Structure formats: C-alpha cells, structure tokens
Image (cartoon, helix red, strand yellow):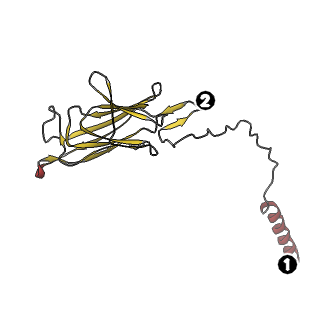
C-alpha cells in the first residue's frame, strides 16, 4: 500500500506545482501612443493657481479670499496683531499688535474680521486686491505682500484704486522680479491693482 501512496503523492505535488506554481502568460497588444497628449511646455515661474485645459486655455481659481478674526487684548487696551495668508499665493497682509483701529461701525473692543481678496481679469491681465472691512486704520502701517505671478508680464505696475475707480500709479516699497511679488504698506484699507506695465 505504501508503494501506491508515495507515487500518488508525488504525482499530486507535481501537478499542483505545474498548475499553481507557474503564472499564466498572455500576449499583450502594443500600446498606441498616438492619443497621449504631450505636456504643455512651461514658460516662466510655476504657478500654483493656474492649470491648462485640453485646449491650452488658461484657467484659474480666482477670486481667492482669506480672513482672520482679530481679537482685542484688554490688558494692553489694543487689538492683537494678525497675518492673513492668501493661499495658495504668496500674498500676505500683516500688522503689529496695537496698530489696528476698527471702523466706526465696529465698537472698539469687539472682534474685527479682516478680509483679503484677489481677483484676476485675464482680458486686461490685471490683479485686483481688496481689503476689508472698509474704514480700518493702521498705525504703524500694515504691510502687504502682493503676488503677481499670475500676470503675463515682467514689468508690473502698481495702482491705487480710489473711490471713483480711478487708477493712480504707485511705487511699491519693495519689488522682487524673480519671485514675482512686491511689498506695499497701507495705513487704511483700500483697493489696489497690479497690471501689465
């Protein structure tokens, strides 16, 4: 009987190895690369806010906005400092503690919600920066870093936009052409634009 089992066990083991131990191979058709689109060549700085659609048309996620609630620090009888980052851009609004005076309609000591928004107009190739609430005052001045990397220009021009929508050219405190940002200081909230020069 042992002679019968031993060859049978070996036969089952060989069959199991042959059937389960080897992978089944199939012929694979060659890949057709004709419908794969080439990547769009990159010209200039990488921009986190843009993407390119199938027709190579620029799209963006604008308007972008951010806000921060600034609380009153009673022991010092002043508002705390704040920083509002307008992600994913490099734009930042910041001011020191004690610099903020709220607008008349917000009772002194109540929290103040600071808003920061940027809109992009692809037709005029212009970015518009809006701060709120209207009527806030800063002493010392608030510092604002404006990211202009969305613009298709190497010579940006800064404008202050008055209440009648007139554009008045301004000089930034600092400009970084490689990083594509500029710094301005503001003693009150208003609108600014950065456009093609």
Q: Residue at x 17, y 34 (%)?
A: 103
Secondary structure, mark 1, is helix
Callout 2 secondary element: loop
Image coordinates for residue 101, horizontal then vertical, percent: 16, 39
Dividing the image into 4 quarters, which one contains the C terminus? Answer: top left
Disc 2 target residue = 55
Give whichever of 173, 96 is nearer the camera.
173
C-alpha gap between disc 2 and disc 1: 76 Å
Lateral position of residue 105 relative to residue 154, left or right? left
Quarter of the N terminus within the rendering = bottom right
- Relative to residue 85, is residue 95 drawn left or right? left
Residue holding disc 1: 2
Position of residue 123 measured from the top left corner of the image (x, y, whole percent): 47, 24
Does 30 sit above or below residue 1? Answer: above
Badges 2 and 1: C-beta atoms under 8 Å apart? no
Q: Residue at x 13, y 36 (%)?
A: 107
């Amino acid at each position: 009987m042992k002679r019968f089992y031993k060859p049978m066990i070996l036969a089952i083991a060989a069959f199991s190895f042959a059937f389960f131990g080897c992978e089944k191979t199939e012929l694979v058709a060659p890949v057709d690369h004709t419908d794969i689109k080439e990547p769009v060549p990159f010209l200039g700085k990488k921009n986190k806010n843009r993407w390119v659609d199938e027709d190579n048309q620029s799209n963006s996620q604008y308007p972008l906005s951010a806000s921060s609630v600034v609380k009153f620090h009673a022991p010092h009888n002043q508002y705390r400092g704040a920083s509002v980052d307008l992600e994913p851009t490099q734009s930042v609004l910041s001011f020191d503690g004690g610099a903020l005076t709220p607008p008349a309609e917000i009772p002194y000591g109540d929290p103040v919600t600071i808003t920061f928004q940027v809109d992009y107009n692809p037709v005029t190739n212009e970015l518009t920066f809006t701060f709120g609430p209207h009527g806030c005052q800063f002493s010392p001045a608030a510092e604002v870093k404006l990211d202009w990397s969305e613009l298709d220009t190497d010579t940006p021009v800064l404008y202050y936009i008055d209440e009648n929508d007139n554009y008045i050219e301004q000089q930034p405190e600092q400009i970084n052409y490689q990083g594509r940002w500029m710094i301005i200081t503001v003693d009150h909230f208003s609108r600014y634009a950065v456009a093609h020069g």
